[in-house]
Image (cartoon, grey):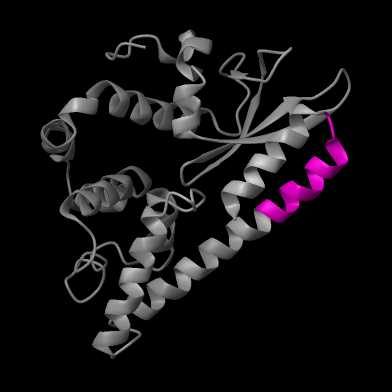
Amino acid sequence: MIKDLIFVLNELAERGLTKENDYLYDTFKKLAYESTVRAEQLLNLANPAKNPSENERQVAASMLSKILNDVDRPEFGYKELVALIIDQNLHDKFSSEDFLGSVLTSMEVDILKELLRKASPAYAAKNPGGFESEMRDRVYREQQRNTDREEMKQSIIDILNLIVGKTNYGKIYIKRSEPRNSSQAFVLSFNGNMATFVVPVSEDKLGIKVLTVEELIEDDFIKLNPELFRGRSWRA
C-alpha cells in the first residue's frame, strides 16, 4: 500500500496538483507513523523483560524482522529501529538470543551496533569500533558482484543523513519527469529507505516527492550532485 501511495503522490507532484499532493502526503505520514508504532509494539512484545512468554517473543521478533526487511514497507528501517532501541535503553540487550538475536543475522546486528555507536557517544565509548573493516570484508564476500552498487547505495544514505533538513550544502537536484528533466529539491526527511523531497511544481507552488535510495541510484542522483559525492571511491 505504501508503495502505491508513493507512486500516486509523486504523480500528483509532477502534474502540479499541490492540494491533492498535500492531502496524500498527510496520509503517507500517518501510515509511516503507524508502521513505527507497530514496530514499537512488536519490540515490546519481543522484550524478555516485558514478556515472559518465549513463544510470543519469538513470533513478535520474527514479525519485527519481517517489517525491517519488507521492500514494500520502505518507511521503516535500521535507523528507525535504532531510535526505538535508544529510546528504551536496550543498547546492550536487543541482540540477545532471547530477544532479537534469534531472528537478526550477524550482519544486521553489526549494522545496528554501528548505528548505535554513531547515535550514542556513551555506547560508542563502551563498545569501540572494529565494525568498518569487518563489515567491508563481509560485504565484499557476500555481495562481491554488486560492489559498486552497494557502495553507491551506502554513500547516498550517508549523504542523505548529512543533508536532511539542512540548506547549507548548496543546491540539491533530483530527476523529474519531462519537460523538467531535473530540478532543485530540499531533503525534508529520510526514514527507512525513503527520502522525502520538497520540489517546485510550478512557478509559485511546491510539492512533495518520495523516492527510495534504489530509485535515486536509478535516477542518477550521484551524477546530478557531483559536489556532494566528490572523492567517493566507486564509479558513478
- Magenta range is 16-28
- Residue 92 position in % (x across, y down): 23, 64
**Which SS type dominates the magenta stretch?**
helix
Identify the image quadrant of residue 156. Answer: top left
Residue at x 46%, y 42% (from the top left corner): 193
At 46% from the left edge and 69% from the top edge, which residue is drawn? 40
Q: Is residue 23 magenta?
A: yes
Question: 125 or 31, which lies in front?
Answer: 31
- When the figure is inspected, residue 100 is found, relative to residue 15, above or below; the finding is below
Residue 110 highlighted magenta (yes or no): no
Q: Position of residue 36 (x, y in %)?
A: 52, 62
Counting from the top left corner in percent of width and height, residue 141 is at: 10, 34
Q: Does 91 appear above or below 216?
A: below
Tell me which residue sits at (80%, 44%) in the image. 22
Give the left or right position of residue 78, taking residue 175 as reference: left
User: Is 62 placed above or below 147 here?
Assistant: below
Q: Does residue 201 appear to the left or right of 135 in the view shown?
A: right
Q: Quadrant of the C terminus?
A: top left
In front here: 58 or 125? 58
| Image-based side of 127 in relation to 220, left or right | left
Residue 30 in view of the camera? yes
